[in-house]
Amino acid sequence: MPVASTFSFDQRKRRLSGVVAIPVTPFDAHGAVESRTYENLVDRLITGGVEVVTPNGNTGEFYALDEAETRHCLELTVKAAAGRASVVAGVGHDVTTAIRAARHAREAGAELIMIHQPVHPYVSADGWVEYHRAIATAVPELGVVPYVRDARIEGGLLARLGDAAPNVIGVKYAVADPVRFASVARDAGLERFTWIAGLAELSAPGYFAVGATGFTSGLVNVAPAISLEMFHSLRDGDFRGAMDVWERVRPFEEMRAADGNANNVSVVKEALAQLDLCRPEVRPPSRVLRHGERRLVTGLLEKWGLH
């Protein structure tokens, strides 16, 4: 049985101030989750210096996995991490399903959960708070990180949520507006939560400038050293160094973001496939890259000295 975490909430908050890796979910030739490959990818992240791993994030194709698969991915992550890194389990969908996933995460040995932005078409401010409160209070032992992608979520709502559920210790903020982020973080409490730039490396410098202390990454699956180089520069206030990394990764991240993030996961998996680390297949509504796109990935890997 997994050993219960001895990390305090303050220690978990400090861990979130870093590169929060979102691992891909590798599939085998028959389209099933490839367990051994998954474990190897997580181990590679942690061996490379990553201290926080989020299975069942968007880069892990959360919405293309069924409930049994998300449980399996979480269990594989906890096993591979083996106490060397904090595991933040992605949960979501309806409240009952999310609570069931959160309780499973606790039983499996995760230290935190990340609650995906509700995808319900009718989200009210009060309903947003209640959705997160219900999930967070069902697992008071776990740290909780709401994933905010909706610009309507104001700092006051996050403060209300923190009052109702003290185990909400961080916020993954993924609204593409650093000015909005600066306001929300200060209205909610800049020191109250760990603020994570949720739009990866290209947004990280701007968000760190106004209060973020960590950022999420899918690129880190491919090149952990590059993502960690950016983080160390940002942590040390070396924005020139961080922007040097920014320029290096910009073409890769822009490929992922093109056409409304249509190939967000596909680009990462293609790079991993070219490095012989996993197959390139993704599930619909994503698609594998075309020949010309694959050649662009090859060129970037060569520039990074990985190919």
Image: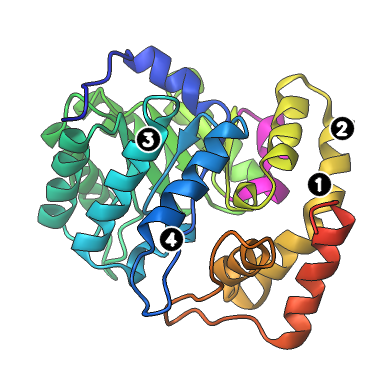
Query: Considering only vertical position in the picture, is 175 above or below 171?
Result: below
| Amino acid bearing label 3 | Val
- Sooner in the amino-acid sequence: mark 1 or mark 2: 2
Distance (Cα) linking label 2 and label 3 = 29 Å
- Sooner in the amino-acid sequence: mark 2 or mark 4: 4
Distance (Cα) linking label 3 and label 1 = 26 Å
**Residue in the picture at 80% in, 77% down:** 295
SS at mark 1 in the image:
helix
Identify the magenta region: 199-211
Q: Nearer the viewer, mark 2 or mark 4?
A: 4
**Residue in the picture at 62% in, 48% down:** 200
Q: Is residue 295 magenta?
A: no
Q: Around disc 1, counting alpha carbons within 10 Å, would you say few (fewer than 14), some (14 to 19), or many (20 or more)?
A: many
Kindly identify which residue carries mark 4. Answer: 25
Kindly identify which residue carries mark 2. Answer: 241
| Amino acid bearing label 4 | Thr
